[in-house]
Image (tube, rainbow, N blue to C red):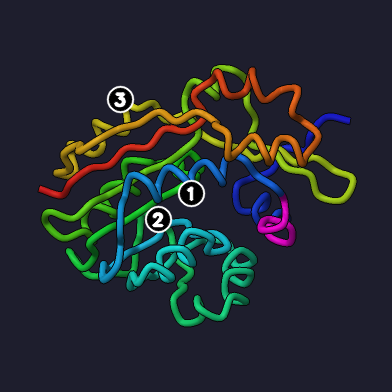
Amino acid sequence: MPPLLVSPIEGHRIWSASYDDDPNPLLALGMRVLSERLGPVHGLRVIDVACGTGRWMSAALSDGANTIGIDLCDEMLAAAARKPALKGCLALAQADQLPFANGGADLVLCSFAMSYFPSASGAIAEMARVTRRGGRVVVADLHPGANEAGWKRAFRSNDSVYEIEHHSHSVAYLEAAAEQAALEQVWQTDAHFGAPEREIFQKAGKDSVFAQASSIPALSVICWKKL
């Protein structure tokens, strides 16, 4: 039976029940790369755009950041709110209509969500608006090379497989949107699966595909500075 194609909102509504329990090497890679590249966030005012179940928020809060997360999926926010540390730090909102004042954040992050937005330029403009001068805007998403290799944004729930609709935003498109929003690139990295993620492949019984998967860039991360 072919996967059921669903919208980002519908997909995440279904996925929310198992999102934190499903071993996911992409999410693990994202957490590893962001923690390495962003450095300490203690004392920073951080906005997590499309925060989902609050996985990255939890890590930032434990590191001493002042963090708030927004998402457009009620069910994902409900899952996040069940984590005691995140209560009162969550809001229902769209990425291109952030409910925050201009220049209030030191760091604004969007991880594994930008390609779900029809208008990535609108989301980047909003992320830039709420960032202070000298602050950082960071976007992490599935690498274009992984898209070209046929990787799917899919998950299993009960006996069904769901594939989530998405848009393919090139790095050049994101860079053009960032330039329009007065953002200047600080660094960009292409990340591959490594030894820490291999454990997840092994536990899922997929160690045989690890070598091939790790040869393809899995994650693209861009960090900009607000001018």
Disc 2 residue type (three-letter) = Ala
Disc 3 residue type (three-letter) = Ala
Nearer to us: label 1 or label 3: 1
Helix, strand or loop: magenta stretch: loop
**Gap between marks 2 and 1, in whole Å?**
21 Å
> Disc 1 designates what residue?
31
Q: Would you say the residues marked 2 and 3 are in contact, meaning their CB atoms lie under 8 Å apart?
A: no
- Identify the disc placed on residue 22: none
Q: Would you say the residues marked 2 and 1 are in contact, meaning their CB atoms lie under 8 Å apart?
A: no
Left or right: 157 in relation to 126: right
Q: Place residue 107 in its image quadrant.
A: bottom left
**Gap between marks 2 and 3, in whole Å?**
20 Å
Q: Is residue 66 visible?
A: yes
Q: What residue do we see at 64% from left, 54% from top?
A: 12
> Disc 3 designates what residue?
172
User: SS at mark 1?
Assistant: helix
User: SS at mark 3?
Assistant: helix
Magenta span covers which residues?
16-22
Mark 3, other Cα within 10 Å: few <14 / some 14–19 / many ≥20 = few
Nearer to us: label 2 or label 1: 1
Provide residue 207's location: percent of width, then percent of height.
Answer: 74, 28
Provide residue 19's location: percent of width, then percent of height.
Answer: 68, 55
Provide residue 214's location: percent of width, then percent of height.
Answer: 58, 24
